[in-house]
Amino acid sequence: MSAPIAFDDVAQALAAGGSTVHAAEAHGCLCGALCARRVCLPAEWLEELLPDGPAPGTPVAVTTAGPLKSLFDQSRAVLEAREMEFEPLLPPDEAALDERVEALGAWAQGFLYGFGAAGPFKPGTLSTTVAEVLTDFAEVARAGAVGSESVEIEEGALAELVEFVRVGVQLVYDELADLRAAQATSTVRH
């Protein structure tokens, strides 16, 4: 696996492109779409992040290369490899605990948005396992206030949630392989 994409690099690329989307939320949105759709193109993801197009004067590399393109390519490759190497894009461990908790909530919210916006699933087509993971991600999206427990307990709880999300995404991706394969190859969204 290639080196992970740095959270700050993605955040800077988004800001340079005129996006106000949180870097973690952007990655969650991407991963949700990758789990739900057979064909997910980088341009579609960037359209979600930059609905008005790149800000005037935005370097072409922000949208066609650089950290956003690398994040897209790496996320797809890691999920397709099915080797449990997936990691949600979150601030580094050196960042403040509340910042990392907020980012995890934003990541889960982005995943649910990306999954819902991209998913052509009819009611009852998702397995119980996938439905439970999505329900749990909705709870993670509400992650908030820190400071009620000791730092060690809260760090441990965050680590457990990150691990749950990491495994949950790969599980959803793997569980939906047959449904994705059965989708038409059209990239038109409805």
Image (cartoon, rainbow, N blue to C red):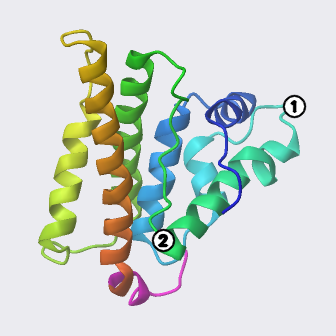
Q: Residues within 10 Å of mark 2 (few under 14, many from 20)?
A: few
Q: Determine if the magenta segment contains residue 181.
A: yes
Foreground of the two, 52 or 64? 64
* Rendered residue at 72%/35% (across/down): 13
Question: x and y percent of residue 183 in the render?
Answer: 41, 85
Question: Looking at the image, can residue 24 be seen?
Answer: yes
Q: Quadrant of the N terminus?
A: bottom right
Q: Quadrant of the C terminus?
A: bottom left
Q: Amino acid at mark 1?
A: Gly
* Rendered residue at 50%/36% (across/down): 90
Question: x and y percent of residue 68 in the render?
Answer: 69, 47
Q: Which residues are magenta?
A: 179-190
Q: Residue furthest top?
A: 147
> Closer to the N terminus: mark 2 or mark 1?
1
Q: Relative to 186, does residue 108 appear above or below in the rendering?
A: above
Q: Quadrant of residue 54?
A: top right
Residue to which mark 2 is pinned:
83
Element under disc 2: loop
What's the magenta bit mostly, secondary-structure-wise? loop
Residue to which mark 1 is pinned:
57
The count of marks equals 2
- Circle 2 or circle 1, nearest the eye: 2
Q: Relative to 84, does residue 17 appear above or below in the rendering?
A: above
Left or right side of 92 for 98:
left
Q: Tell me, yes or no, whether the two marked residues, 2 and 1, touch with CB atoms within 8 Å.
A: no
Question: x and y percent of residue 53 in the render?
Answer: 70, 42
Foreground of the two, 160 or 136? 160
